[in-house]
């Protein structure tokens, strides 16, 4: 087998050194009745060509985003990733390295993590960021637990326009610890959500997403003030990190913790994963942060170097007293993020954000020109919500048949709420052309 | 006579030199120093060509970002060179043996990378209409089938993002099953062996369970009598790693499982070490109720410098109904993703909730699938056999030079302690750092905690006998050097890495976690 270097002669010789008669001898601690010899129900080994053929066939059954006019967002966004990114992250030294527990021979990983942490802090307008989390949803749930530790309170209040999956992940983790969660009903874009009224003396944190599930930009300032007045923290959730090239960062609006999904920069859609969770906060809370942190130090010769630090928060040292059970982060996705953002730079990143916004504005006005279609948002970045004259699920289905992936029905993630049935959440990024827009509008007219 | 070198260019080797002088650049030949991107800022330079958009009226409301973000400007060649130079400061499995115990640093086939990048897998949105992602759902379903077959378990939750996340998922399923039985409040204690990974007690604590440590026997296994004495009506589960973190198979595992079940508790198995038994032993036959599988260990998806991983959890009949959302079912009209509680109820299941947005680490699923298909069931059995053979070869070859706390045979990893260093003034850490000078990544140090100054070596099945012989020779040589009073070689190690030993105490005492532009000096004092 091509991945196994030992030959039969090697195996015999090695068994001799060990003093074992056969490999079975080495498995002698396994109880007799649990020993098996292969599995009849699984196929036998295959060469590269056969595997490639089979998986290519499977992949071809999917409609890939590059093959159609594409307008789906909802927490995962299709952006163009420069060729350099994928080339660099496939370098052996990055791809096949382990967590940098031996800093002297993993300065490459540690330095890019330090760069990543700095970039995330700058984008979010916060003091410090960690070396990444699994994804935005788990970062959000960990932020709530961190707020519990900081405030020594147990109750989180969630905005109704938090991504429904994020809400479910937060509820799941909080319920595990027996902590109550109050989640508001979703307020449609253009309608104000009175979350401030829900902040009480036992509230540990308020969780608000901007842009919201419906694409609406949310003013965090008054919410931050109200939360702080009651001794609670504001957790801001940013599902589309490109928005921060154009929009006031949560750090400037009073957020105490900012979490986000970093997939948009450097990472593909990948049917939902792997992605990269962003996690930033204020310096005063750093010792309550979950996840890995990279810090600067010096070596025995006084030269600058980087190490994983503050690991006394982590499970491998603190065990049951750790701030989180997290071990792995999303290293390679963080690297892709860092490289892509380095290529963009200050000017490129801001321009990318403007292109996204421009495309969304143009699409919004084109779609709202279709009879019976209404654009609901007041302020948005690259995603917005329209009301259709009929079920959004049926429309999306019909659009797919016409070769257009035309957005996310709001009810897919919030079922059983009749007011959402006709709402369609639509995203547009730099990948969309004038032709894509025209195709979308034409197809929509046909299916309505 | 050659036309080349006719101008007197010397061709002899020159004089040998210690090389112990400082260079102007700080570089030492191919060992290159590299600043941070923020120090390479070239304002006005860019690595992308984007046109300014026109013909739109902004709809941002009052949210326009005004201040400078502070991102550096760099051209594409500068970015390329920066990250290539950084990469060269890293050790990697592609460049050499990476014997980290418990981490399974095996070869990462590039076919996996190629398959994961097929647009049909890589460029598909998780919320596309399901009829447009039938191939992606088929892949998840096929991988699930393989995982269930290989473990002898009836169900698998695919969405957890990593091993520790899988542990959490498995323990949540256990809790949900206890709650459904009306024993959620009654069973508050989790038994965890002393030798367990740190994630086990951390996970149990996250779920508000009390962690109760089970002592080990002198032969490195769970103390069966002590374990049985700890069982009671307040025990929710045992979390046990098998093969355990000492690299040993728990001989009494079936008896342990039976006792756990008799006491009304569940058996969580930490599957980090599945590579030792894949294709030879099915956890389902051992009485396991839940076990996570690190696709980035056993099934060769790359570690990527610390993630992304993937940690699907196989579940027993008792726990299967409580598996989290989402999951894939195969019906008459193709594959269907069950995403909501309503749909799940209609299917007769009771998901405990959701671990993550979307459906899990698809990119890792494709890689693991390509790996499994390549090996087939016969090849996977060979994987376990060669992994165990390689570890035993290391143990047998080194046990007279280093000190082994337990009798063999071991499974996929060989454990040593620091008795062989006694009186030398060399610590486990020094010994490990000296391996760096020999061109090796060190083994896992100081873990498991049940052994003093532990050195845990996991060679994996993808190392050749020749590579192992050289590694064994190196360790013998270092052990002799340590005993031969060559102390400074160890305490000053590494001498030849991009950095000497780094001051971790300073990093923790005075945390510098991001780059800051230097504060300009005060103009007037």
Image: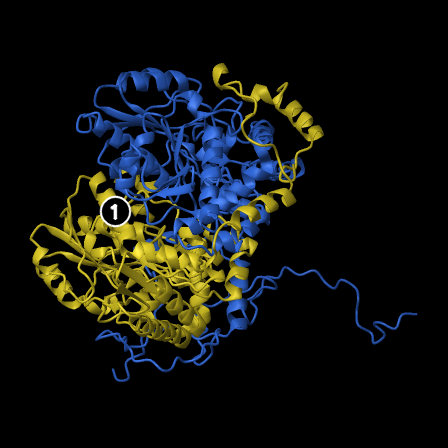
Q: Residue most toward the right? A: B1
The image's colour scheme reads by chain
B56 or A371: nearer the viewer: A371
Q: Is residue A74 visible?
A: no
Quadrant in the picture for residue A322? top left
Instruction: Name the residue rendered at 42%, 43% in the picture.
Output: B310
Residue A301, image x, y percentages: 47, 60
Q: Colour of chain A?
A: yellow
Instruction: Name the residue rendered at 62%, 62% in the picture.
Output: B19
Residue A133, image x, y percentages: 35, 52
Judging from the image, mark 1 belongs to the subunit labelled: A
Judging from the image, what is the letter of the chain drawn in blue? B
Q: Residue most toward the bottom? A: B524
Asked if B190 appears above or below B437 in the picture, the reply is: above
B69 or B60: nearer the viewer: B60
Asked if B364 appears above or below A27 in the picture, the reply is: below
Q: Is residue A46 visible?
A: yes
Asked if B91 appears above or below B64 in the picture, the reply is: above
Quadrant in the picture for residue A341? bottom left
Asked if B146 appears above or below B127 in the picture, the reply is: above
Q: Using residue A65 as the reference point, say whether residue A188 is left or right of it.
A: left
Q: According to the image, label 1 marks what residue? A: A168
Q: Using residue B399 as the reference point, say whether residue A172 is left or right of it.
A: left
């Amino acid at each position: 087998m091509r991945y196994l270097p030992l030959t039969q002669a090697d195996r015999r010789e090695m068994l001799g050194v060990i003093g074992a008669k056969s490999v079975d001898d080495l498995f002698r601690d396994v109880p007799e009745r649990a020993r098996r010899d292969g599995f009849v129900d699984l196929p036998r080994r295959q060469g590269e060509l056969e595997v490639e053929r089979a998986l290519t066939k499977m992949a071809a059954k999917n409609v890939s985003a590059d093959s159609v006019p594409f307008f789906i967002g909802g927490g995962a966004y299709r952006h163009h990733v420069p060729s350099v990114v994928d080339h660099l992250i496939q370098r052996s030294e990055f791809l096949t390295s382990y967590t940098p527990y031996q800093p002297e021979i993993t300065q490459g990983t540690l330095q890019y993590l330090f760069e990543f942490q700095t970039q995330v802090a700058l984008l979010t307008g916060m003091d410090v960021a960690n070396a990444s989390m699994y994804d935005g949803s788990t970062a959000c749930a960990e932020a709530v637990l961190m707020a519990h530790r900081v405030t020594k309170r147990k109750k989180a209040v969630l905005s109704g326009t938090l991504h429904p999956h994020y809400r479910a992940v937060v509820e799941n983790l909080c319920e595990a610890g027996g902590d109550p969660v109050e989640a508001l009903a979703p307020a449609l874009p253009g309608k104000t959500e009175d979350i401030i009224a829900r902040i009480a003396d036992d509230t540990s944190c308020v969780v608000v997403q901007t842009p919201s599930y419906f694409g609406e930009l949310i003013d965090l300032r008054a919410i931050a003030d109200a939360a702080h007045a009651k001794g609670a923290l504001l957790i801001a959730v940013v599902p589309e990190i490109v928005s921060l090239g154009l929009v006031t960062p949560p750090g400037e609006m009073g957020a105490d913790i900012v979490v986000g999904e970093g997939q948009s920069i450097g990472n593909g859609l990948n049917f939902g994963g792997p992605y990269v969770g962003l996690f930033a906060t204020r310096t005063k809370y750093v010792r309550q942060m979950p996840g890995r942190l990279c810090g600067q130090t010096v070596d025995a010769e006084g030269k600058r170097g980087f190490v994983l630090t503050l690991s006394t928060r982590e499970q491998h040292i603190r065990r049951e007293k750790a701030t989180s059970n997290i071990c792995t982060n999303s290293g390679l996705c963080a690297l892709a993020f860092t490289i892509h953002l380095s290529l963009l730079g200050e000017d490129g990143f801001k321009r990318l954000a403007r292109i996204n916004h421009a495309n969304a504005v143009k699409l919004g006005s084109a779609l709202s020109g279709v009879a019976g279609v209404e654009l609901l948002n007041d302020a948005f970045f690259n995603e917005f919500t329209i009301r259709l004259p009929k079920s959004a699920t049926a429309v999306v289905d019909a659009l797919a048949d016409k070769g257009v992936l035309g957005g996310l029905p709001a009810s897919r993630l919030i079922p059983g709420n009749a007011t959402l049935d006709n709402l369609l959440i639509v995203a547009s990024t730099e990948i969309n052309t004038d032709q894509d827009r025209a195709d979308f509008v034409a197809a929509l007219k046909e299916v309505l | 006579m050659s036309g080349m070198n006719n101008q007197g260019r010397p061709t002899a080797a020159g004089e040998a030199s210690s090389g112990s002088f400082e260079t102007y650049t700080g570089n030492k030949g191919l060992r290159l120093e590299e600043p941070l991107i923020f120090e390479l800022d070239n304002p006005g330079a860019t690595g992308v060509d984007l046109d300014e958009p026109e013909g739109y009226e902004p709809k941002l409301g009052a949210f326009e970002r005004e201040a400078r973000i502070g991102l550096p400007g760099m051209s594409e060649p500068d970015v390329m060179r920066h990250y290539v130079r950084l990469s060269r400061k890293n050790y990697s499995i592609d460049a050499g043996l990476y014997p980290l115990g418990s981490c399974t640093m095996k070869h990462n086939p590039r076919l996996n990378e190629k398959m994961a990048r097929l647009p049909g897998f890589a460029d598909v949105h998780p919320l596309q209409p399901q009829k447009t992602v039938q191939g992606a759902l088929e892949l998840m379903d096929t991988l699930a089938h393989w995982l269930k077959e290989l473990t002898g378990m009836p169900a698998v939750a695919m969405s957890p993002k990593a091993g520790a996340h899988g542990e959490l998922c498995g323990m949540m399923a256990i809790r949900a099953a206890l709650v459904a039985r009306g024993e959620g409040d009654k069973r508050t204690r989790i038994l965890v062996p002393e030798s367990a990974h740190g994630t086990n007690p951390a996970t149990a604590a996250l779920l508000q369970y009390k962690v109760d440590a089970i002592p080990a026997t002198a032969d490195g296994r769970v103390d069966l009598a002590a374990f049985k004495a700890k069982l009671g009506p307040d025990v929710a589960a045992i979390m046990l790693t098998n093969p355990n973190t000492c690299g040993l198979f728990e001989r009494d595992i079936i008896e342990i499982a039976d006792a756990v079940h008799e006491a009304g508790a569940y058996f969580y198995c930490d599957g980090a070490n599945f590579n030792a038994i894949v294709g030879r032993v099915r956890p389902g036959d051992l009485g396991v109720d839940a076990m996570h599988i690190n696709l980035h260990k056993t099934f060769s998806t790359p570690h990527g410098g610390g993630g992304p991983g993937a940690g699907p959890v196989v579940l027993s009949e008792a726990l299967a109904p409580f598996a989290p959302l989402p999951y894939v079912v195969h019906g008459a009209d193709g594959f269907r993703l069950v995403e909501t509680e309503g749909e799940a109820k209609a299917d007769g299941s009771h998901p405990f909730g959701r671990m993550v947005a979307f459906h899990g680490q698809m990119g890792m699923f494709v890689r693991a699938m390509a790996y499994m298909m390549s090996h087939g069931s016969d090849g996977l059995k060979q994987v376990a056999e060669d992994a165990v053979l390689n570890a035993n070869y290391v143990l047998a070859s080194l046990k007279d030079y280093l000190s082994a706390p337990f009798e063999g045979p071991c499974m996929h990893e060989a454990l040593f302690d620091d008795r062989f260093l006694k009186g030398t003034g060399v610590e486990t850490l020094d010994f490990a750092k000296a391996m760096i000078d020999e061109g090796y990544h060190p083994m896992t140090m100081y873990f498991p905690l049940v052994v003093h100054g532990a050195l845990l070596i996991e060679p994996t099945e993808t190392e050749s006998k020749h590579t192992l012989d050289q590694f064994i020779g190196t360790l013998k040589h270092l052990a002799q050097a340590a005993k031969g009073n060559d102390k400074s070689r160890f305490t000053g190690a590494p001498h030849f890495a991009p950095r000497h030993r780094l001051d971790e105490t300073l990093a923790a005492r005075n945390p510098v976690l991001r780059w800051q532009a230097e504060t300009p000096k005060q103009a007037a004092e």
